[in-house]
Image (spheres, helix red, strand yellow):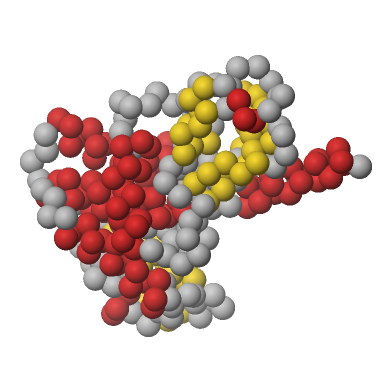
Amino acid sequence: MKTRLLIIFVACLLMQGAAAHAQNHVGIILSGYEDNCQITHLGKSYDCDERRQIYLGDVIRKKPSVKALKIKWAPYVKGASRGETFLEAVADKPETFQAKSYAGAAKEYFQDFVRPAEYRVTSAVTRDPRYRSAIPDRVTLLPGYPMLISHDGMQITSLAILAADGKEIVKMPVGGNEQIVLAPERLPLKPGENYSVQLRDDAVVRRFTASVLKKELEEQVIQGLADIDKEKLPGAEAVVRKAAYLQMISDLYPETLDLYWLSFQLLRDSRFTLTKEQEEAFTALRERYYSYRAGKE
């Protein structure tokens, strides 16, 4: 009976993982992975190589005991024991969003999970070159941080926003190569609702999902960005910290937040002269944006 229950438990975890939103890795195996160790990610099994990436929802099986594993976890993530030989990667975050804590943890998150030279990790996700497009699939819009959309190889002639019931609530023409600006404070969007944004040219329609946060959470997310500003970091370093913060909270709240687009936009639109170290940081954060998008298997 115990074996049957364990099989059911693991199957449920795999179903949850397959339904989850895209994400980046939140753990890295450092040691103890030798022999009888596998990670199940989105229904596929991988050997526990050194520095193997671990994602939220992944199930790790290690015999004779998961206690032999040493894993570096991102802030607010842990390995939850599911018996002697099974471990699940889960979020270990406060019940309510804590802007100051998350903004402070962004430095550790960047140092341990973003820096390109620190970890030569083994990926568990196949990357798709289609996701080099700058237009995302899903966004959470924030007041005061307008989304700036380029044509991305299209000849966009109009933009439309549709409610969940298919009703068109916004329609506007787009001229020439002008940049498209989506500012939620200027749009009739309701907090907590999902909308379909359609970018149209004569032959193609590109779509992505947009939502606006409920007021309390929205204020906390923006407060985290303000807390980073209070540190008075040099310009490029402030951009790096904000981008890491936005990526980290998107990984921690995948059902609610998708602010990878804003992290990418901050990096893309920065006009600072970068040192070699800063350029590496910008490149690593941009790569995490592409990696995140490509993880929608």
**33 or 158, nearer to the observer:** 33
**Quadrant of the frame with the C terminus:** top right
Reply above or below: 157 against 45. Answer: below
Q: Position of residue 15 (x, y in %)?
A: 70, 49
**Quadrant of the frame with the N terminus:** top right
Reply above or below: 226 against 124. Answer: below
Visible residue check, residue 149: yes
**272 or 249, nearer to the observer:** 249
Q: Position of residue 242 (x, y in %)?
A: 26, 53
Report the residue that reaches farthest toward the left: 273
Q: Is residue 276 left or right of residue 267?
A: left
**230 or 119, nearer to the observer:** 230
Visible residue check, residue 135: no
Residue at left offset 37%, top offset 82%:
188
Residue at left offset 34%, top offset 63%:
99
Reply above or below: 120 against 204. Answer: above
Residue at left offset 11%, top offset 34%:
275
Which of the 4 image quarters holds residue 204? bottom left
